[in-house]
Image (cartoon, grey):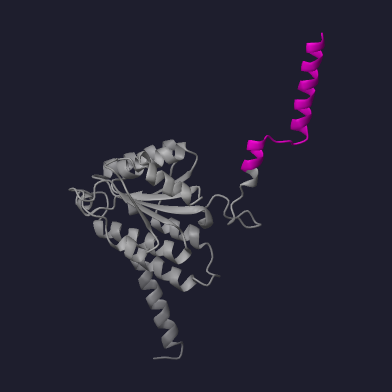
Amino acid sequence: MLSKLKLALLSVGLVLAVGLGLQSPAAHAQVSDQKSSVLPTGGGQALLDPSDTVILLLDHQAGLFQTVKDIEVDDLRRNVEMLARLATLLGIPVITTASEPAGPNGPLMPEIHELAPHAVYVARKGEVNAWDNADFVAAVEATGRRTLVMAGVWTSVCVMFPALDAKAAGYEVHAVIDASGDPSAMVSRTSVARFAQAGVIPTTTNAILSETHRTWNRPEAAELGKLYAQVAPNYGAVIESYLKAREVGPGAD
């Protein structure tokens, strides 16, 4: 009889807790983990928080570039360069890695570390999946950031494997498709589908730039504008036309 009474009291307590809006420690942590980039309007809730973001550039190697068929290699490299410039401009950490840079896959494209001198390179010991390498995972954890923006060659392997593992480890993961490359368009489409099924967010360099930019009312606006011209050369032509029109003025011949 006593045990039944205790059970009844426990049930009432649980109902009251729910009714009063009490939360478990895990639920409370989730609610308090608010993005610093969210505005009073609610804007930014579903977007990247630059202060919580780290960019991972995986296996952008000269030998692997020769196998890429789903995007022009010049476009791929330009988009990777844009991510490196953006990271430097906004102070976003960058981690690079390669499985076997001394082998046929070749060295990393040098522009990454030239444009993002703060980037940290993590050597692997032959692991195909960067997340199999303890030093790489430790480097990610050391940033203290939980939003990972990944790009690499191949998308279906070098990005896919660590992206799935990082997602399983509780990170928010964005895969930058046009700063990555695959052996065929079919492989690329399949990669995007698998990302979506696993909860990894497929995205583009232009989207990453815009999500971290957020407003023209900021001191870096002019430099960010130059990055738009890099990721979308036609927009660069628009900017040039606009600047020339302002220079000439309405009263010119």
> Which residue occupies 37% across, 68% down?
229
Please give left or right for residue 243 compared with residue 24 in the image. left
- Farthest residue to the top: give it: 1
Please give left or right for residue 8 compared with residue 48 in the image. right
Secondary structure, magenta segment, majority class: helix
**Region rendered in magenta:** 1-30
Image quadrant assignment for residue 55: bottom left
> Which residue occupies 57% across, 54% down?
44
> Which residue occupies 45% across, 87% down?
249
Quadrant for the C terminus, please: bottom left
> Which residue occupies 47% across, 38% down?
169
Return the x and y of residue 166 as percentages of the image width and height: 43, 41
Image quadrant assignment for residue 82: bottom left
Whether residue 202 appears in this view of the structure is no
Quadrant for the N terminus, please: top right
Foreground pick, 102 / 232 = 102
Foreground pick, 24 / 205 = 24
Foreground pick, 203 / 243 = 203
Whether residue 188 appears in this view of the structure is yes
Please give left or right for residue 51 compared with residue 192 in the image. right
Return the x and y of residue 83 as percentages of the image width and height: 38, 59
Foreground pick, 94 / 142 = 142
Tell whether position 16 is magenta.
yes
Image: 123 above or below 109: above
Tell whether position 5 is magenta.
yes
